[in-house]
Image (cartoon, coloured by chain):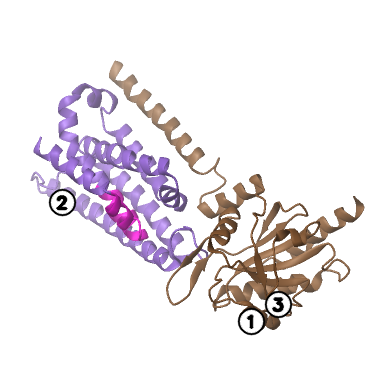
């Protein structure tokens, strides 16, 4: 319950107009701070929602695959240059952002991740690394302005951050898998469960 | 095996959701950036030139009706620009030079509109235009002195100019072709001079026949 309230507070904070306009004033803050924090608020709500609707989650997201597919779709949509522009331009897209990140990314991710098998986790991480890497290259090397609301300098910066996250996530996951394998070979139970 | 089927149903729903999300989000997979969407939409909507008062490099003031019954080859720029605008106006000059003289001023007018009216006063426009070979008659440079009118024109034609400090703007760049009734009919790549000349000649020839 406590976590749920923290999530609500975070969400309310992020929805405050001055905070919205500040976080959207820079491309990097928009993509890598505002959107992930919205997802984080959703994650904080998840235990409460799971307790409230246990059948919904076990029935429709039994093995975590539908959930992670939803996360992949929504994240892939949001990294399109156009999505960020339209969130600023059209309030309907902005509302969709404030719904899709907490629920379709945050809640879905939190509910799915533990249910996924190691291999599925690895695959998911590599997928996110891949699309982030591609977007990194696109944003770094694009000659023209991809987002009308942001400058090319910011676009490059965002590109590098995409690339950093992409590499970081891939290395982290691969390293974890390697550790797990080593520990399994040594017959110990790993603490890197998730 | 009911659980298995539910899982599959949710996957099918999600795939459909994803398809619609991307379909609507990219106008049927045609526009992945807002700029592309803007151009597509402009060409579809064919906005009309709003009523504004222009002030040209000779200090003359008039509205777009001064060009009624003529095509207008428009660009948007500011003289303080050191990067893309000189390139843009050089390219305008190249297009201008390739249009047969008998059409110039008769069937088509070249008009470069500054979106920095504070700095781009008539004298500044005059000096700037002379570098590129503007004759101030068939190729005019002008500013829109009234801020509200300028904003309306830029919005209508989807021109985005963000001030980035030091008097500079980051802005989108294109050739705009307006028909004789004041409707936007084409937005062209400013680097494709041959394509622009071809397009202009095509509409001019069609006018002659019709």
Q: Is residue B8 visible?
A: yes
Query: In the image, what residue occupies the spot 32% across and 21% down?
Result: B6
Q: How many marks?
A: 3
Q: Which residue is mark 1?
A: B123
Query: In the image, what residue occupies the spot 37% across and 39% down?
Result: A96
Q: Residues within 10 Å of mark 1 (few under 14, many from 20)?
A: some
Return the x and y of residue B184 as percentages of the image width and height. Answer: 69, 53
Identify the element where label 2 is drawn.
Answer: helix
Question: Residue A33 colored magenta?
Answer: yes
Identify the element where label 3 is drawn.
Answer: loop
Q: Which residues are magenta?
A: A17-37
Return the x and y of residue B84 as percentages of the image width and height. Answer: 57, 73
Q: Which residue is mark 3?
A: B58
Q: Residue furthest top?
A: B2
- Mark 3, chain letter? B
Q: Residue furthest right?
A: B209
Nearer the observer, A2 or B139: B139
Question: Residue B182 colored magenta?
Answer: no
Q: Which residue is mark 2?
A: A182
Q: Is residue B69 found left or right of A54 in the rendered image? A: right
Return the x and y of residue B116 as percentages of the image width and height. Answer: 54, 71
């Amino acid at each position: 319950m406590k976590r749920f309230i923290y999530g609500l507070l975070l969400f309310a904070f992020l929805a405050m107009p001055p905070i919205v306009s500040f976080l959207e004033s820079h491309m990097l803050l928009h993509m890598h701070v505002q959107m992930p924090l919205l997802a984080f608020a959703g994650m904080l709500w998840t235990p409460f929602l799971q307790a409230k609707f246990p059948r919904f989650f076990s029935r429709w997201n039994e093995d975590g695959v539908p959930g992670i597919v939803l996360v992949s779709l929504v994240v892939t949509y949001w990294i399109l240059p156009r999505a960020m522009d339209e969130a600023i331009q059209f309030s309907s897209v902005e509302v969709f952002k404030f719904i899709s990140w907490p629920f379709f990314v945050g809640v879905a991710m939190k509910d799915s991740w533990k249910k996924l098998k190691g291999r599925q986790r690895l695959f998911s991480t590599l997928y996110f690394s891949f699309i982030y890497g591609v977007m990194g290259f696109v944003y770094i090397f694009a000659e023209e302005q991809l987002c009308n609301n942001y400058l090319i300098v910011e676009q490059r910066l965002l590109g590098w951050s995409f690339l950093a996250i992409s590499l970081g996530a891939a290395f982290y996951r691969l390293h974890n898998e390697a550790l797990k394998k080593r520990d399994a070979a040594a017959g110990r139970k790993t603490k890197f469960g998730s | 095996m009911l659980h298995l089927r539910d899982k599959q149903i949710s996957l099918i729903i999600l795939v459909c959701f994803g398809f619609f999300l991307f379909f609507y989000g990219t106008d049927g997979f045609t526009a992945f950036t807002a700029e592309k969407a803007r151009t597509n939409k402009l060409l579809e909507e064919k906005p009309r030139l709003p009523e504004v008062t222009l002030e040209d490099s000779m200090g003359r003031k008039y509205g777009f009706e001064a060009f009624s019954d003529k095509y207008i080859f428009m660009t948007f720029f500011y003289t303080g620009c050191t990067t893309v605008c000189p390139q843009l106006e050089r390219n305008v000059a190249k297009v201008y030079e390739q249009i047969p003289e008998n059409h110039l001023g008769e069937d088509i007018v070249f008009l470069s509109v500054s979106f920095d009216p504070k700095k781009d006063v008539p004298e500044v426009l005059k000096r700037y235009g002379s570098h590129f070979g503007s004759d101030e008659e068939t190729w005019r440079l002008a500013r829109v002195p009234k801020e509200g009118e300028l904003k309306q024109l830029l919005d209508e034609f989807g021109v985005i100019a963000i001030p980035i400090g030091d008097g500079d703007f980051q802005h989108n760049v294109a050739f705009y072709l307006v028909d004789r009734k004041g409707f936007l009919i084409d937005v062209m790549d400013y680097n494709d001079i041959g394509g622009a000349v071809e397009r202009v000649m095509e509409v001019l020839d069609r006018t002659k026949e019709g």
